[in-house]
Amino acid sequence: MSASVSRRAVLGAGLAAVPVLSSRSPQPMEAGAYISFSRTTGAFPLVGAPVVVDPDDHPGVVRVAGDLRADIERVTGVRPGGGLAREVVLVGTIGRSALIDGLVAAGKLDVSGIRGSWETSLQTVVERPLPGVDRAFVVAGSDPRGTIFGAYDVSYGIGVSPWHWWDDVPPTRRDEIWVLPGRYSQGTPAVKYRGFFINDENPALGTWAPAYFGPGKAPGYPGGFTADFYARVFEVLLRLKGNYLWPAVWGRAFAEDDPENHRRASEYGIVMGTSHEAPMMRGIEEWNRHAVAAVRDSSGAIVTPGHDPYGGTGEWSYRLNSRAIQAYWRAGVQRMVDQGFEGVVTLGMRGNGDTSLPDGDGIELMQEIIAAQRQIIEEVTDRPAAETRQVWTLYKEVQRYWDRGLRAPEDVTVVLTDDNWGNVRKHPDPAEPGRVGGYGLYYHFDYVGAGRNYKWVDTANLRNVWEQLHTAHAYGNRELWVANVGDLKGNELPTEFFLNYAWNPEDWDLGRLGEWERRYARQNFGAGQADEIASVLAAYGQLQARRKPELLNRRITLVDGQVVYDDQQTPFAFGHRELERVTEEWRELGRRAERIGRRLPGGGVRDAWFELVGYAVAATANLYELRSAEFTNLLYAAQGRAATNSLADAAEAALARDFALADRFNSAVAGGKWAGFQTQPHIDYGDVERYGPNAGWQQPERDNVALPDVLFPAVRRVGVGEG
C-alpha cells in the first residue's frame, strides 16, 4: 500500500473478532517510558516497521506520522515506509481513522480508558490487527491532538529532542528500538490550554526569521513572519505537548504577514489566541497599519482629521471611535468563522502600545466594551456567546477593574498574571463562586517595560517557577496558561518546564526538579554528563535569579536635570567583597561549563550545547568580568590608583570576548544557521545621557558592532605616577 492506507481498504479488510482487551485504563507513564533500546520478551521492534496512517484523519495527524518516520530515521538511519508489513505502526484518532475504528469495532483495541477524553493518547501493541499483519504498535488518540501528542511522545522516547530543529540537537544513534508490552498513556493534561507568546522579538528573532524564511508577504512589511516560520513554532509547541499560541506582535500581524498563517495553524492543530492588548482575534498591528489617528486640541475638537478602513477617525479610543472599532472587531471574529480555525477570543481593551486606555479606567466603560464584544460574537457566530471560548486577561492596570468589583460573564476564562518578574500577582479567591470559564495564567520569561527589560538570555530559576506554578494550580487555576518566551530561542529550558508542569503538575514536585534537569540534559546531550550538566543548570538559574544581566550598571541619578554617575556605587557593594565574590561564582560556573563542552562529542552535540547552555553561561560570566573590571576601574581612577589601567585593559578585552561569543553564535554554530540571532543589546541599560528618557528601562538602541565606548561609559586611565 501507499504511505497512507485508504479508508476503503481498511473497511474491507474483514477483521476477525478476538477477545476484548481489558477495559482497565492505560498505565500513565513518563514521556517515552515504554521505549527500550534492548530486546525484551514480547517487545515490538520499531526499526523497520512501516508507519501507517489513514489519509482521511486530521491533517495534523497525517503530518505527524511523517514526522515520526523522520524521527525514527534520525535515530536509526533507517526510514520507515508507509505500507503494510508483518509488523507495523498504526497512528490514528478515534472517530476519524478507519484504521483505529476498525480495530475497536473488531474488539482488537480497547479504547475505553481514553475515549471522550481531552488530548489523551494510548500506546499499545495489538496482535493480528489486520490480515497479513502479525502485530501492530498502535498510537491512538482520543482526539487529533491526543494522537499528535502520542506520536511525538514516541519520538521523545526514542531520543529526539523537542528542540532538534531550534537548537540543532542530534539524537543518540541506535541500532535497536523496542516498544515494551503493555498499555501506556501520558494521561489527560491538567491545564486545558497550554502555550506561549512570541514577543519582544526585535532585534534577534526579527532580524533572523525574515532572512532565514523569507520576508513577510504583506505589502510594505517585509519583517513579517511567514507560515514556514510558524510551522517550526507549531512543531516545537506540539512536541512539548502545548496547543495554544499568541503570535508575535512587534510590527507584525499574523493574519496579514502571510495569508497561509491561520490555515497552517489549523493543519497543525494549534489553537490561536491574541495577546492581552489585542482583542477579538485582531493583532493591534492590523489597526496601526491601516489607521491614522485624528489630532485633537485640548477641548477635544479635531484639528487634523484621521481615518481608518471602517469610516472612523483612526483613533484607538472606544469613546471617540466606537463604531469603527466595533466594525474592526467584527471583522476579526468573522475571519475566524470564515477560515474555520480554532481560536480563543480575547475580550476587553487596552491602550495602543501596551498601555492603559486613553479613555480612562471607568468600570462602566469596560462593561460596555465587553458587552459590545459579546454581542458581536453572538451575531457573527449565530450562537450564544458562551459557546465561543473567550478570555479576559488582567494584565497590569486591567487588574484594577477586577479589584474594584468588575466581573466578566461566568463562561469567560479570567487570566491572572505575574508581576512581569515571575511572581504571580493574584490567585483565584476560594471564597468566590467557581467560574464556568475557570481561570488562566499569563507568566513571563521575557519582559520589556518598567522597571527594566530582560530579554537577552534565560534568567529563570526553576525553583521559583515551580513555586509560582504550583501555587497557581493549587488555587484552581487550570484552564489556560501562556508564557511570554520572547524570541523562544534562548528560553528553551523554562519553556519546556512550563509546558511539562502544565501537563501534569503531580509529576514534578519540588524534590524532583533535579531529576527534571537531568532528564533535560540527557535528552539534549546524552547520558554521559547529565548529572554535571544538571548541576550547572541549577547553579545558572540560581545566579541569574539574583540579578538579571540587564541590571548590571552603575547607579545613575539626575541632579538639576544633569546626569550624574556615582562611580562608587554599582549594583553590588564594594564592601564585604560582594562584587568580587559574585564575579568569582560566575567565573567558576563558566569554567565548569567550558570543561563540559570540551568533553562532549564533536560536531552537532557541541553546537547544541553552545546554543542551549554554553553561550548563556559563558556570555553572562564574561559580562560579570567586564562589569567588575569596569566598575572597579572607575573607582580606582577616582582614587588615582596605578591598577586603573590594567582594569581598563581587562574591561575592553571582556567586551571583545562578548563580541566574539555573539559572532560564534551568529556565524559558526550550525554552519551559520542562526546568522543575526545574537543581536540583543545587553550592556549599559539605564544610560539616560546616551540613550534618552526611556533608558531607565528600555534597551540601548545600539548594535553590538558599535565601538566599545558607545556600548558602555568609557573606562578611565590614569597617567604613570598618578597612583
Image (cartoon, grey):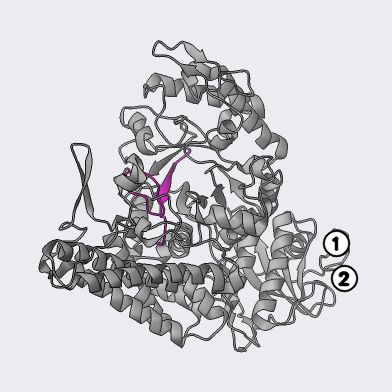
Kindly identify the residue that appears in the image at 37 percent across and 57 percent down.
Answer: 711
Residue range highlighted in magenta? 437-458
Q: Quadrant of residue 516?
A: bottom left
Q: Earlier in the sequence, mark 1 or mark 2?
A: 2
Question: Quick one: which residue is furthest to the front in this view?
Answer: 720
Q: Main secondary structure of the magenta part?
A: loop
Above or below, 421 against 70 in this view is: above
Q: Amino acid at mark 2?
A: Met
Q: Secondary structure at mark 2?
A: loop
Point out which mark residue 494 bears: none
- The location of residue 699, given as percent across then percent down, is 39, 50
**Residue 151 is a magenta residue:** no
- The location of residue 475, given as percent across then percent down, is 34, 48
Q: In the depicted view, which residue is nearer to us: 325 or 203?
A: 203
Above or below, 709 against 346 in this view is: below
The image quadrant where one finds the C terminus is bottom left
Contact flag, marks 1 and 2 (Cβ < 8 Å)? yes
Q: Which residue is mark 2?
A: 1
Q: Amino acid at mark 1?
A: Ser
Above or below, 75 against 391 in this view is: below
Point out which mark residue 6 bears: 1
- The location of residue 643, given as percent across then percent down, is 18, 73
